[in-house]
Amino acid sequence: MSYPPITITFLGTGTSTGVPMIGCDCEVCTSADSRDKRLRSSILVQSEHTTIVIDTTPDFRYQMLRENIKKLDAVLFTHPHKDHVAGFDDVKALSFFSKKALQVYANALTQQSLKREFHYFFEANKYPGIPDIDLHLINMEPFIVGDITITPILVWHLRMPVLAFRFGKFTYITDANRIDDTEKEKIKGSETIVINALRHQAHVSHFSLKEAIAVAKELKVPQAYLTHISHQLGLCNITGDGLPDGVSLAYDGLRLHFS
């Protein structure tokens, strides 16, 4: 199977509260380092012909404006938590200018949430200005959007099924604290993995820093980037300097290129 060259842009690398966190005056939330300013977690996947966003965070509008995105072919959703779907209404502008239905891919749980929270997108008689949505069920088989092949991977966010995605040599995982052995096989052979690392301390539904590093090491992925980061993980320059070789903190605006 051949894959086109792609560019990954980190639209956001923060946890559900973002960083800085409202009302907090810790050293991370008051840091002047731009790498410590984290919008909610999302990435942009682009080939020469295709543009995909994974998750529409509460910061989706700003993320699209910051990256000057004028065209969007599809949205892939990982799961229905608000920090991953709340910006869905803002796809209206992109759909208006494209004059095409937006392709949306999600599992059954997330589809139920979208239809409940954004019911007006799916009504037979839509209010003027509501875009057309083509909603596709992800059934765990590889699928293609434009010229990009996508392999879904099931991970667990405590008891909630969450979708991770592999694009050729690159795998993206957010909001997970467990991966079954059968799904780990889908990740092996990746050259780069992005994985959530909420904080140093253990958490009920997210990998900690130590756990995220252990997953990357177990799967023998040469380069790991950490995302979905809270202010509890510490300053980027200090925590980042203490990471082992082949592990880095992702930050908003970071771009990775794969050929």
Image (cartoon, rainbow, N blue to C red):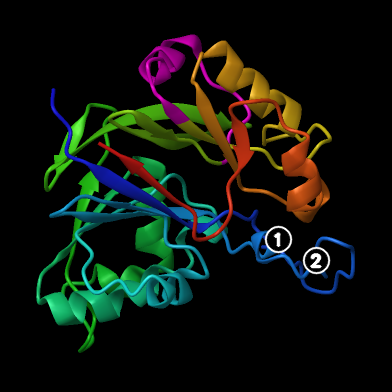
Residue 115, quarter of the rendered image: bottom left
Residue underneath mark 1: 36
In the image, residue 92 lies in the stretch drawn in magenta: no
Give the distance between the C-alpha atoms of the residues marked 2 and 1, in whole angstroms. Answer: 7 Å
Residue 191, quarter of the rendered image: top left
Do the residues bearing badges 2 and 1 touch, measured as CB atoms within 8 Å?
yes
In the image, residue 191 lies in the stretch drawn in magenta: yes
Q: Position of residue 223 (x, y in %)?
A: 51, 28
Who comes first in sequence, dot 2 or dot 1? 2
Residue 175 against residue 180 in the figure, above or below:
below
Depth order, front residue of 55/51: 51
- Residue 29 — which label? 2
| Front tag of 2 and 1 | 1
Identify which residue is drawn at 37% across, 33% down.
Answer: 170
Q: Would residue 125 be seen by someone viewing this image from the given angle?
A: no
Residue type at mark 2 is: Cys
- Residue 256 — which label? none
Task: Spot the residue most to the bottom.
Answer: 128
Q: Position of residue 43 (x, y in %)?
A: 42, 53
Count of marks placed on residues = 2
Q: Position of residue 16 (x, y in %)?
A: 64, 57
Residue type at mark 1 is: Asp
Q: Which residues are magenta?
A: 175-192
